[in-house]
Amino acid sequence: MNEQVARDVVLVRAIETVDIKSEILSQEDRMYASRSAKELAQWQAADSKSPVTGEHFLQQRSELILKRLSERTPAFAAFAQRRPGLKGFSIALPVAGLIVGAGLDRITDPHRVDLLSAPLLAIIGWNLLVYVVLIAWLFVPSKNTGWASKKLLRKASAGKSAIKRKLPQVLSVALLSFMSEWAALRDRLTRARLSRTFHLTAAMFGVGAMLSLYARGFLSQYVAGWESTFLDASQVHAILSVLFAPATAIFNIPGFSIADIEALRFTRPQPADAGARWVHLYAGTLLLLVVVPRLVLAFIAHWRASALARNFPLDLDQPYFRKLTAQAGANEPGVLRVLPYSFSIDEARDRGLAAVAAMLLGEQARVMLRPSSAYGEELGDPVKDGDATLTAVLFSLAATPEKENHGAFLEHVLRHSPRGIAVLIDESAFAERLGGPDGQQRLAERIALWQQFCSFHHAPATIVNLLDPARRPIDADATPIASAAP
């Protein structure tokens, strides 16, 4: 799935998730889109003599839904066709870098080459510092390491956050939700593209500085030399020997001695042809230490961005996608792994779990029920046997949540579940024993307690009733999936 298809699919998911009352997208619209997408995906598969895939089905379905919404709401059509990404910025910034670099000679005396030129030394020093930082980042485990601000990443990923007022309120909320989610999903791709732009800009700045050196050399006579209050000729020789070592070695430019450096003091008469060698040395150094490394880094960033754009990392095993693609027969039946904690599942509740799995993963979904973990027992690896589409932790609302037991179990499962987990709280036993007029109030208080407890552990809860699943219907679109913190 490429970037554009993924964007359309995520946009449709945001709209369907927010539009729970079918105000802008009726159930008939959704069913029609699913049926038509299934047929189109099957025809496409037949033409290519390949099996139906979930990607083809989701692509066709999202295109149909977006087309219908665009026909109904012209203001939405403009948003759906928007292609954010600061494409103009990625072209304008390198061009600006080339122009600024070409005007570098205006900063200093254009008729002399200063061996200790502050602007040229600053360019080289800054780029060397950048390389050191980039190497250091390779050894930093944090996933949030980076120079780009969240505001810049969001703007580059999703564009301007302003939404036209002509849109219905539900659609406006859905678009804002989409922009936030899309910026997070596109984070790696956006960082790669911004890195490519900034590396290319730095390379063009170096090229501009080289061009300015040679262009002035054709139109004026350079006088080479140096002056310093604190450095003598031997110290300047040591600095320049290190600085120009790559250029002298690769381009076979003649070296220089301490006597040569001493003779180039600006307080002494200068040889008429002294400037050319130093122009070549500075230009060669800029090429080797600035232009070439930055172009290599820009190419690496471009390769990464192209790979991510062609194969966008969208997890199609999420319940929303599994439930949709199951309609097209584009995937194997989903498997819901259930991990009960201090909770015995009888036959009636086992049937309720099957209904919950169908709500989350489609009609053909099946349940993988693990043995219940006893209260306070030592925790093992909860997900080591078999593969599952989604892992769900199951608690009973009748229990009072405890950090050292329920909380420890929840965090342990999170750490061992790379795809994230759903947290299900069964109210059936607690609701059965409640009586009197204050029963509903006590039920609401206990639900609020569990939701607050699970939110504290960064794992939002979903309330279910395993004896009567229809009392607490759940939607795959809106079921929160918790992931372990990076």
Image (tube, rainbow, N blue to C red):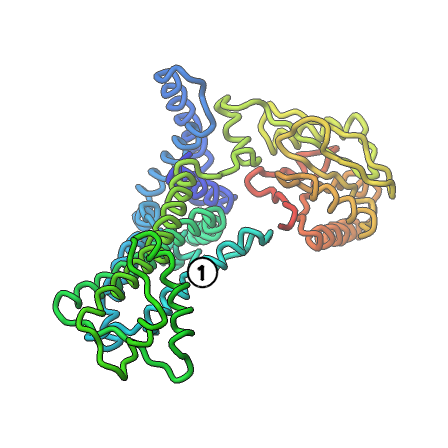
Residues packed near mark 1 inside 10 Å, few (<14), some (14 to 19) or many (20 plus): few
- Percent from the top left, x then y, of residue 454? 71, 50
Location of residue 271 by image quarter: bottom left
Task: Identify the residue at the far front of this view.
Answer: 259
Q: Quadrant of the N terminus?
A: top left
User: On the picture, is 385 further left or further right than 215?
Assistant: right
Left or right? Give the position of 22 relative to 82.
right
Name the kind of residue labelled 1 in the image.
Val
- Residue at the spot 35% in from the left edge and 68% down from the top edge: 257
Percent of width and height locating residue 245 = 38, 59
Residue at 33% across / 38% down in the picture? 67
Q: Decide which of 485, 356 is in the foreground and name it.
A: 485
Q: Is residue 276 visible?
A: yes
x and y, in percent, of residue 135 in the image: 51, 54
Marks counted in the figure total: 1
User: Please, which residue is most extreme toward the left here?
Assistant: 219
Residue 154's place in the image compared with 472, above or below, is below
- Given residues 121 and 353, the one toward you in this image is 121
Q: Secondary structure at mark 1?
A: helix
Label 1 sits on residue: 130
Task: Indicate whether 148 appears above or below 81.
Answer: below
Q: Is residue 37 above or below residue 163?
A: above
322 in relation to 329, above or below: below
Work out whether residue 197 can be spotted.
no
Question: Residue 201 or 29: which is nearer the viewer?
Answer: 201
Which image quarter: residue 253? bottom left
Q: Nearer the viewer, residue 208 or 187?
A: 208
Q: Which residue sits at x=28%, y=76%?
A: 264
Q: Residue at x 49, y 58 (%)?
A: 132
